[in-house]
Amino acid sequence: MDSLKKVREPHNVDFHLDHSIGTDKEVMNYYHFHNVYEIYLAITEGAEMWIGNERYIISPNDLLLLSSSDQHRVIVNDRKGFERYILYFNPLYIQTFNTYHTTLLECFGINDSKRTHCLKLSTEETQKLISLYSRLSDIKDDNDSYAWEIKQKILLSEILIIINEIYIEGMRKRKSEKITSTAHQSLISIMEYIGVNYDKDLNAQQVAELFDLNRHSLNRLFKEITGISFHKYLVNTRIIKAQELLMQGDISTTQACYESGFNDYAHFIRTFSNAVGISPGKYAKQFQKIK
């Protein structure tokens, strides 16, 4: 729980920028999700990222985009030299900059089955983002200057505008190739099955038999690919679905509980709060205020 708390702390603020070289034991190299959106910019090679049922071998100038609905893990192979920038931000923080015609979240491809999570940037584009990141850090550190809160929000919006322009072009020209191994391929159908049937009464034994496996083989496969058990992956999926329902509004926390596959309300409240950092009720109120 302490390690979860450490990882979650920067994910419940308006935004958080992290520049890292190498890694340590605190890295979450198992499937997880955040209560924020994530922009992951790789400066060097030396890692791979698994997002849902997709795998990407990270190269220099790769830009990976993850919403709060994306379960993912990063496996760092170069634990001394792998360099990256990670920008986390709360989508509600820049909500006021969205218009009827434009949303700064378009690059995250919400509900777009043709989306790509990874874009190949040019060196010039990478350097432009790094320059903006540097300015963003300077403003955040100098919070005594005039209108610093407005400046940082404008700068974050500028970063998202640039990334959206790259994304729109990239959807036509610069998609990253998704890679699947034999073991990974065998798990895709199971992940897709969970994605459709998360609201039903599922258990490892039942799903294993459906795919001609035994329960131990199923859990071993999940551990190998995702770093977590079948049960944990299922719970994560249900919490993400509950988040999506609560974001839409016009639904009670009780409805969100049962429609996302939980059959015990007290367990739902406790599990959601532990994973997301706030209760389902408070989570829903954030979006009600915006509406």
Image: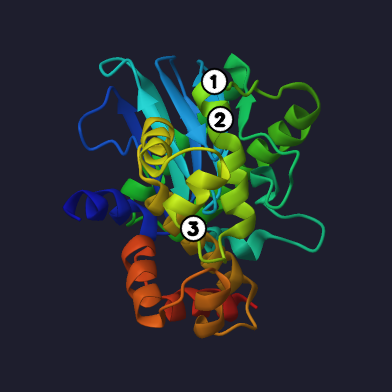
Q: Does the residue at mark 1 contact the one at mark 2 (Cβ under 8 Å)?
A: yes
Could you say which is closer to the camera, residue 80 or residue 131? 80
Mark 3 falls on what kind of element? Answer: loop
The mark that comes first in sequence, 2 or 3, is 3
The image's colour scheme reads rainbow
- State the separation of the CA atoms marked 2 and 3: 34 Å
Mark 2 falls on what kind of element? Answer: helix
For the residues carrying marks 3 and 1, which lies nearer the camera in this image?
1
- State the separation of the CA atoms marked 1 and 2: 6 Å
Circle 3 residues within 10 Å: few <14, some 14–19, many ≥20: many
Could you say which is closer to the camera, residue 267 or residue 104? 267
Mark 1 falls on what kind of element? Answer: helix
Residue underneath mark 3: 90
State the image quarter where residue 115 is shown: top right
* Quadrant in the picture for the C terminus: bottom right
Judge from the rendering whether residue 112 lies leftward or rightward of residue 197; answer left or right.
right
